Amino acid sequence: MAKRKLKRQLNLLQVIMLGTAGTIAAEIFVLTGHAAGIAGPEAVLALVLGGVLTLSIALNYCELATTYPVTGGAMTYVGQGFGNGLIMFLVGSLDGLSSTFYAALSAIGFAISVNVFFPVLPIVPVAVAVIVVVAAMHIRGVTKAGNLQIVLGAFLLVVFAIYIIRGLTDPNGFSEATFNSGNIVFAGQNTFQVIARMLSAIALTYNAYVGFEVIADDAEEITKPTRNIPLGILLSLGIATLVYSLVSLVTIGTVPFQQLAGSETALTDAAARFWPNGGIQIMAAAGIVATLTSVNSAMLSATREAFTLSRERVWPRVFSRLSRWRTPYAAIILIALISALVAAIGVVDFLSYISSAGYMFVLFWASLAMLRLRKDQPNIERPFKVPFYPLTPYLAAATGVLIIAFADPKALLFLGAVLAGLSVVFWVSRYYHTRSELQQKLEHEEGGGRILVAAVHQDTAVSLTRLAAQLVDQQEDTSICVFSVKKTPFKLSEAQVPVFVQEQNSLKKQLLAVTAPIAQSRNVPLYVKSKAASRVEEAIYGELARHRDISMVLLGYPKDESKIHTPNNILKEIVMTAQRDVGVLRDRGLEHGIRRVLVPVGNGPNARLALRLARDLASPEPIPVTALRLIMKCDDAEVVEDQQAQLHDIVELELGEVPPYVELKVEMVSSVLEGILEESKRGNYDLMIIGAAEEVLSPEQIFGTLNDSLLEEAECSMLVVRQYQPTGTIWLHKQLKKIEE
């Protein structure tokens, strides 16, 4: 099944920096003091041990990410191993939420570093601001994000190298006596207590090691994935472990750990002693860069998780929408909003514990998925195979359990509440999704309300009734109301009333005579109503108000086009303001039947209504339907593939599947109008169904520039449709479309 794909655009250097900079960033500045407060000098050993323990997980990811090089990371692997059920939902959601919490943590760290230069700036607003800026950058494309990682990551590594060298060589820097001074505090503790302190420190800082996971999350966007993914994962982990351990060694060996305990400025505190001339400012600048890369990496990971969850129909489909830069803009906006809200909490160590515990839950299930996939899919190609199998995945799973066990109890309670809440959301959504599918099936089989045929003339009534009867042929509880309005003067004299009543009854009989045989031929219930009113639109609105079960209004396009191109024509008013789905038919020979249907497909809700109506017309005896998507000519070959996948997704979403009678067609054109006209002639179509423009810019237009031109130039019959949407829904859709464009 074709799916929307992201563009492969991240090279090896970008991948390494994406993992490295995201790993050694925020924690090294924000959490070093907290880790020292928990484990004292043994914090350095704990950090080395954390990197060693993470190696087994990293090796698992090398195999999984090269075997399944698509966006999604752990959720993809769990889905492959255990199916698209609760576990996949929990893993994907928690992975995204953990990255979201990590982005918030990093944003706070950014604000703290900025505060060194600008003490008057408040922490929370600055943290929120950087989240918004990074989100806007991600909407424009990950190539820019990847290039940013290279520049910022290189700067970061240079600063850390200087920090380590100066700290180890300067007389005011690292001192063995200072480093070992903390042992007095922990004197008398047994081996188990020492190990427990170290494991607690690892649990606090563990998200410092899982920056490589962003590489797996973005596997679909990495060039040469079989080579670049394992190299990127292993090198980023190795660099991060080395840098983090050496930096903490210098820091704890320069400032007594009792002074560092709980500090979120540990590195600048140490730099002030052995790097007095500009050290504080340089490390603060490095802190700004480091935390910025963490925000960048974490948000990139979280948004791709949301994108994949949406693409797999676990989350709402809106979050898999791609912008014109082929980035999941809706998912990016969602993650940015959550990160900004979490950043307002401002409790650094608590956020870190939650993020680390969440990551370990995800990595635990990824390790189990590795074992399951080796068993269930033994013959699948694996470009990278983990060494020492099955010991490595078992060790990875055990590492996850061990680290979670030593996390902060409050964080574990919070994590448990999140998992319970997500489980409830899953089962409730599954219940309503099942009910929705059943309801759609019932509506398709049994009907969906009445169709109001607003007829002005007999010939209009015939063509509209013929179309309505074919639309509801298989809907047993749906009837057709042929509704005619006899225009009257604003004031009728007593002598005029009988005349109008007689004319009204006569018109009713005439309409019944020409429409009843059409409905009877398809066994569709039909009745005719005629009403006298001074304004046609008011009569139609009154009928809609009295009968809420009317689901759609069908109108005919006037033969006198002078009546249509006016600022305030009746047809436009009804289309725009009737709180129902509306269709306007220009008949050019439907009396001969409908043998082929053309549906130009855009991204809006009106195009989706057109697809559903085409499906209804194609029953019970399928008729060929062409779903057409046109794109402007360009040199990017991937655009056609991407648009083909998007078209497949849209049709599948609206129809449940792509029926065999539906042809999916994507073409490059220099003019959308000319492209549709050429296809309509080439395919010898009887009817074109097209969605009205969501916004009509000119008062003289009725359906938009494209549709108005098609109505004039198309040789086949044409049905322009507009789906009813509440005002709030329309506004939200417009905002999303602006971002998408």
Image (cartoon, helix red, strand yellow):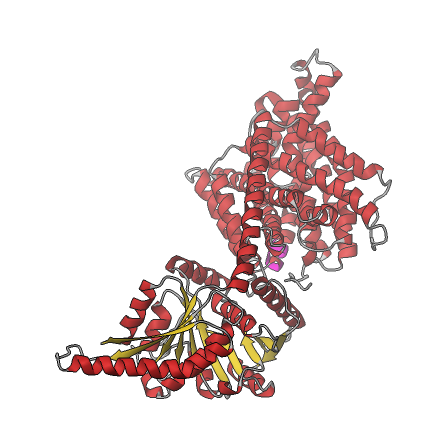
Can residue 394 be seen here? yes
Give the residue drawn at x 70%, y 13%: 189
Can residue 171 be seen here? no
Task: Classify residue 187 by image quadrant.
Answer: top right
Locate the N terminus by quadrant. bottom right
Nearer-the-camera pick, 295 or 573: 573
- On screen, 681 above or below 536? below
Task: Classify residue 192 by image quadrant.
Answer: top right
**Does residue 698 appear to the left or right of 663 in the view shown?**
left
Give the residue drawn at x 41%, y 84%: 514
Give the residue drawn at x 32%, y 63%: 545
Horizontal and vertical percent position of residue 309: 61, 51
Nearer-the-camera pick, 492 or 150: 492
**Does residue 453 appear to the left or right of 539 in the view shown?**
right
Magenta-colored span: 143-148
Is residue 144 shown in magenta? yes
- On screen, 610 above or below 150? below
Nearer-the-camera pick, 453 or 480: 480
